[in-house]
Image (cartoon, rainbow, N blue to C red):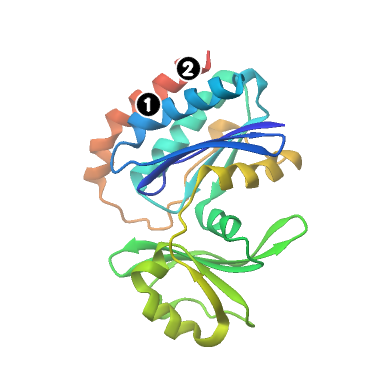
């Protein structure tokens, strides 16, 4: 099973190909250049692997939470490519991606949401993937939902930005912290593989980002609109 995956939810831009369990990946710290970089990454990976869209089972993308504009870019490109090739898509949560990257069994994921808040969720590994113990939410670090039991691993930029507050909040429940982890397409691909294996891919027209924070800077979205529309159009042409 071959899967294309992409993530543009953070300052990093990444793409990956899942080739029956083998993963090829590209990433770069993008700043605000995600839409300039992501299609080139995808082309390079597919050329390296010698595959085209018709060889894919589906396309996964980092659905959020994360950067408002970045989530729109990933969703739009995944939709454009999938629609053109008649493929299903798998929207994958970025907080679940952190859990996947951690290698741990019980994970509390936290991404810096700015404005003194974090995107937060908690997961436990199971035989079929990740079981959600605390659904993705937006909160202040000092108000993060409590964890039951011990042996938790904390992951993500929320621990880099608010490590002291989160350590105080969770006391001895945390056995390790991995603040350097960020959502990556290789983890999107691994989770998307489970989605497509179980037949749970969705029609690209139904795919949507997971914003969590409803109030966003509309001016930022408006400035990104033309760039996003161009990226979607390019992706549609690329898929033909």
Label 1 element class:
helix
Of the pair 64 and 5, the residue shown nearer to us: 5
On the picture, is 185 further left or further right than 10?
Answer: right
Label 2 element class:
helix
Could you tell which of marks 2 and 1 lies nearer the N-terminus? 1
On the picture, is 37 further left or further right than 6?
Answer: left
* Count of numbered badges drawn on the protein: 2
Q: Where residue 120 sits: x, y (%)?
A: 48, 66
Quarter holding residue 159:
bottom left
Q: Give the alpha-carbon distance from disc 2 to disc 1, as whole Å.
A: 10 Å
Q: State whether residue 143 is above or below residue 14.
A: below
Which quadrant would the N terminus be assigned to in this image?
A: top right
> Which residue is located at x 53 percent, y 66 percent?
121
The residue to which callout 2 is attached is: 238
> Which residue is located at x 41 percent, y 47 percent?
9
Quarter holding residue 32:
top left
Q: Where residue 223 sits: x, y (%)?
A: 23, 37
Q: State whether residue 165 is above or below residue 24.
A: below
- The answer to whether marks 2 and 1 mark residues whose Cβ atoms lie closer than 8 Å is no
- Kindly give the residue lying farthest to the top in the view shown: 240
**Crowd band around label 1 with a 10 angstrom C-alpha radius: few (<14), some (14–19), many (20+):** many
The disc placed on residue 132 is none
The residue to which callout 1 is attached is: 231
Of the pair 176 and 167, the residue shown nearer to us: 176
Quarter holding residue 204:
top right
**Crowd band around label 2 with a 10 angstrom C-alpha radius: few (<14), some (14–19), many (20+):** some
Q: Where residue 17 sits: x, y (%)?
A: 59, 33
């Amino acid at each position: 099973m071959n899967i294309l995956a992409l993530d543009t939810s953070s300052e990093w831009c990444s793409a990956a190909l899942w080739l029956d369990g083998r993963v090829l990946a590209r990433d770069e710290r993008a700043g605000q250049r995600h839409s300039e970089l992501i299609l080139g990454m995808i082309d390079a990976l597919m050329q390296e692997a010698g595959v085209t869209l018709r060889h894919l089972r589906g396309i996964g993308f980092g659905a959020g939470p994360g950067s408002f504009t970045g989530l729109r870019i990933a969703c739009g490109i995944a939709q454009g490519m999938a629609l053109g090739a008649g493929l299903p898509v798998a929207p994958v949560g970025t907080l679940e991606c952190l859990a996947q990257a951690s290698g741990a069994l019980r994970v509390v994921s936290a991404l810096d949401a700015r404005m003194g808040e974090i995107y937060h969720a908690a997961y436990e590994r199971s035989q079929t993937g990740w079981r959600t113990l605390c659904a993705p939410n937006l909160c202040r670090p000092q108000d993060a939902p409590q964890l039951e039991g011990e042996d938790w691993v904390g992951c993500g930029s929320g621990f880099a930005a608010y490590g002291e507050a989160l350590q105080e909040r969770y006391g001895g429940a945390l056995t390790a912290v991995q603040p350097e982890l960020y959502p990556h397409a290789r983890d999107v691909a691994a989770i998307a593989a489970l989605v497509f294996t179980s037949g749970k891919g969705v029609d690209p027209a139904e795919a949507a980002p997971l914003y969590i924070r409803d109030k966003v800077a509309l001016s930022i979205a408006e400035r990104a609109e033309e760039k996003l529309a161009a990226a979607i159009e390019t992706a549609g042409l690329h898929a033909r």
